[in-house]
Image (cartoon, rainbow, N blue to C red):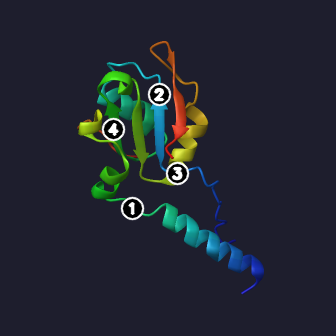
Amino acid sequence: MTPDRVYQFRLEKEMEERNKYMTDEELTSILPGPKDGYEILKAPENYKPL
Amino acid sequence: MSRQVIRLPAEVNRILYVRNLPYKITSEEMYDIFGKFGAIRQIRKGTHGDKKGTAFVVYEDIYDAKNAFDNISGFNVAGRYLIVLYYQ
């Protein structure tokens, strides 16, 4: 593996880690919730994620 | 050409903290404004006191969050300019 490939590989690992799926529990553990004055909005029925 | 991984600065993450929102903004409007930049994982809107007018917008993908951050600061909603920060 060339140094550049090694760098790319490490980059990919880092971004994969930062971008991995967060469960509802994980989100609730890091974000303020109903008892802190924040409500979780219900997505509109016709909402189609891009 | 292998896909070039773009490394994002440390402070970039998938959760945006938004301020200066109209108090009575609806879920539909929030999803409409922020959904343009990518799939939204969840939105938490402030309901009381100084939390009103603020929200946390969580994107599925960190690159979409960056795209939203880059394009939405200063966006005008009902006469109010949105302030957008990365959640730390």
The residue to which callout 3 is attached is B13
Q: What's the residue at 39%, 61% (across, down)?
A: A21
Image spot of residue B5 (x, y percent): 64, 65
Q: What's the residue at 30%, 30% (across, down)?
A: B27
Check chain identity for marks 2 and 4: say if they share one. yes
The residue to which callout 2 is attached is B19
Q: Earlier in the sequence, mark 2 or mark 4?
A: 2
The residue closer to the viewer here, B55 or B73, is B55
Q: Is the Cβ of the residue at disc 1 closer than 8 Å to that at disc 4?
A: no
Q: Earlier in the sequence, mark 3 or mark 2?
A: 3
The residue closer to the viewer here, A21 or A36, is A36
Q: Chain of mark 4?
A: B
Where disc 4 sits, the SS reads strand
Give how far apart the Cα atoms at labels 3 and 2 are. Answer: 17 Å
Give how far apart the Cα atoms at labels 3 and 1 are. Answer: 12 Å
Is A4 drawn above or below residue B74 in the view shown?
Answer: below
Q: Is the Cβ of the residue at disc 3 closer than 8 Å to that at disc 1?
A: no
Check chain identity for marks 1 and 4: say if they share one. no
The residue to which callout 4 is attached is B44
The residue under label 3 is which amino acid type?
Asn
The residue to which callout 1 is attached is A21
- Give the crowd class for mark 4: few <14, some 14-19, many >=20 residues within 10 Å: many
